[in-house]
Amino acid sequence: MNIRKIALLSLFIGLSVVGAMIKVPAVITSVALDAFPALLAAAFFGPIAGGIVGGLGHMMSAIIGGMAMGPLHVIIAFEMIVLVYLFGVLYKQGKSYTAGFVFFIGNAFIAPIPFIFIFNLAFYVALLPSLVIGSLLNTVIALIVIPRLSSYFLAGKKV
């Protein structure tokens, strides 16, 4: 990994922190726009780099939000790593809309499933409206911005 790539990944983690400050109100906790920089990183630098940005971006969002779910944010960060990784793999295969759909469904409906067992079904149902809105916003923003920035980040492929 070269210095330029490390600097750009740091920039995307910083963008996740900024996105973490843009909250979508929720019943139980808040959802933020911290995922779209991770999706950008996955598209430009690969699934592993995007996953790292996604996991760290979520932890920064959790810290900014006061760690409302305590150590359970580690579970969510791991889920973000997996979801952003899957997005990156599918996006690199040229399946941008499939990548967006998988991320949206995974983030909005599948990722919160463990909390049914940790808390209860009511907790899961209460999370869904804000997760759907937040996931949709993160995914749509990423799918709009990626093609517009790709000429800059993929021009020389020396990243």
Image: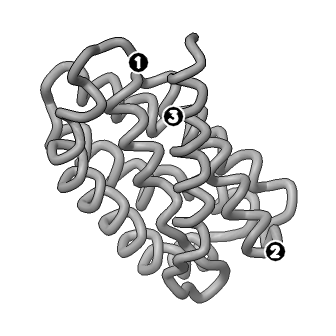
* Viewer-side residue, 144 vs 11: 11
Task: Residue 36: give x, y in percent of width and height.
Answer: 41, 54
**Amino acid tagged 3:** Leu
Judged from the image, the secondary structure of the residue bearing numbered disc 3 is helix
Mark 2 residue crowding within 10 angstroms, few (<14) / some (14–19) / many (20+): few
Question: Cα distance, mark 2 to mark 3?
Answer: 27 Å
Instruction: Name the quarter where the N terminus is drawn.
Output: top right
Label 1 sits on residue:
159
Residue 76 in view in this figure: yes
Whether residue 79 is visible to the viewer of this picture, yes or no, is no
Q: Residue at x 66, y 83 (%)?
A: 28
Sequence-wise, the earlier of marks 3 and 1 is 3
Q: Position of residue 27 (x, y in %)?
A: 59, 88
User: How many angstroms separate mark 3 from mark 1 (CA)?
Assistant: 9 Å
- Report the residue at 73% width, 74% height from top: 65
The residue singled out by tag 2 in the image is 66
Q: Looking at the picture, which amino acid does disc 1 mark? A: Val
**Mark 3 surroundings: few (<14), some (14-19) or many (≥20) residues within 10 A:** some
